[in-house]
Image (cartoon, rainbow, N blue to C red):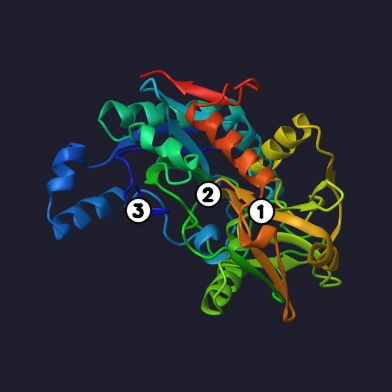
Amino acid sequence: MAAGFSLSLYPFVYKAQFNGQGWIDEIQEKPHRSPEEESAMGQSDRASLLASRNSFPDLPLINYTTQYGMGCFEGLKAFPQKDGSLKLFRPDANAERFYNSMEGLRMPAFPKDKFVQACVEIIRANAKLGFRPQYKSEWEKNHFVSADSIYIRPFSYSEGGIGVNLSVNPYVVIAATPVGSYFDPDASSKAVTTDRVRATPRGTGWIKCTANYVIPTLAKREAIDAGYMEAIFLDAQHQTYIEEGSSCNFFVLLKNGKLVTPAVEDRVLNGINRRSIMILAAERGITVEERPLNIEEVLADAVECFVTGTAAGVSFIESVTHKGRTAVFNKGKMGPLTEDLLTTLKGIQYGAVPDKHGWMVGVEL
């Protein structure tokens, strides 16, 4: 199993730049050997080869992205199927969010159809070389929690520049890498609130902006150092209402049977797994509410808690601690609704459950 994120980039990458009138694009083939030959290489030689794949000398180092965080990115996955094929999960939704993020940063937005096409093309090109995971039946035993997939990372990158400014001729790069479980399924899943502020009204919280991840990285590390798995952010104004985890959306099942997740507004990222889970829960007859979610309500009335995201999938939270008070959900075990939603979502992604929503996009190999 691939362990979390990896810098073992696949050889084919996509690159485009806006030239003032349109997007000029290409697929670049980076140095590589066969997957078998690369696996047999010594550690030093393989590290050098992988470093060469993560080198883009044609992109400017000093620019508005590297100097001021003026950039955005996406994360989506391709999943191996039992029949040997590969399928992407809801790339059209990622394309729309990427378009909106670029618009939100006032740069030319990348066309949605081109986004989907480019993602499919690099997965196909890499798979033809053998750079892809193969489906394993053993993954079914734990609902695909430990299954492998391909992580696709599209991101914007500005033209060269110095001084605070907007990007008018941005690049878009799309790379792919193997990925495994983001959260260790056997580790503690305790969460703790943080007094750090992730997003403010009229800010960039709704944009998948690179700068948004600095504070969450610090908060998550502080949580880990204190013995927790995850940090939970509260609202900037009152420090009362839950907004997000460090890189994931937050859900609770209340005693009254309602599933509640914080409203997106302009501070919470509108996650694609978030939206998918809301649809799946509603299909089960569960009332789903998007609204302000008071931390006191969670401590008093929640019976299940989980987070969602491209990396996290659906990950249950065993407890939340706030100012020294701890609420434990379902005796610290994954709740039945969480398990049902996890099983269904993963099943759709890996082809074990019918995809009646048309979420999966096939890659013709």
SS label for mark 1: strand
Local crowd at mark 3 within 10 Å, few (<14), some, or many (≥20)?
some
Local crowd at mark 1 within 10 Å, few (<14), some, or many (≥20)?
many
Q: Position of residue 37 (x, y in %)?
A: 13, 41
Please indicate whether residue 313 sits to the left or right of residue 131 in the image: right
Rendered-image quadrant of the C terminus:
top left
Relative to 173, residue 198 above or below: below
Q: Where is residue 310 in the image (x, y as percent from the top left)?
A: 56, 45
SS label for mark 2: loop
**Type of the residue with mark 2:** Ala
Q: Which of marks 2 and 3 is in front?
A: 2
Q: Where is residue 281 in the image (x, y as percent from the top left)?
A: 74, 37
Local crowd at mark 2 within 10 Å, few (<14), some, or many (≥20)?
many
Q: Which of marks 2 and 1 is in front?
A: 1
Relative to 318, residue 264 above or below: above
Quarter residue 26 falls in = top left
**Mark 2 to mark 1: distance in Å?**
14 Å
Q: Please tell me which of labels 1 and 3 falls first in the chain.
A: 3
Q: Are marks 2 and 3 in contact (CB under 8 Å)?
A: no
Q: Which of 140 and 211 is in front in this view?
A: 140
Relative to 14, residue 82 above or below: above
Residue located 66% across and 35% down the image: 96
Q: Which mark is residue 7?
A: 3
**Type of the residue with mark 1:** Phe
**Type of the residue with mark 3:** Leu
Q: Please tell me which of labels 2 and 1 falls first in the chain.
A: 1
Q: Please tell me which of labels 2 and 3 falls first in the chain.
A: 3
Residue located beneath label 1 in the image: 306
Q: Nearer the viewer, residue 219 or 340?
A: 340
Q: Position of residue 282 (x, y in %)?
A: 78, 34
Residue located beneath label 2 in the image: 311
Residue located 64% across and 34% down the image: 93
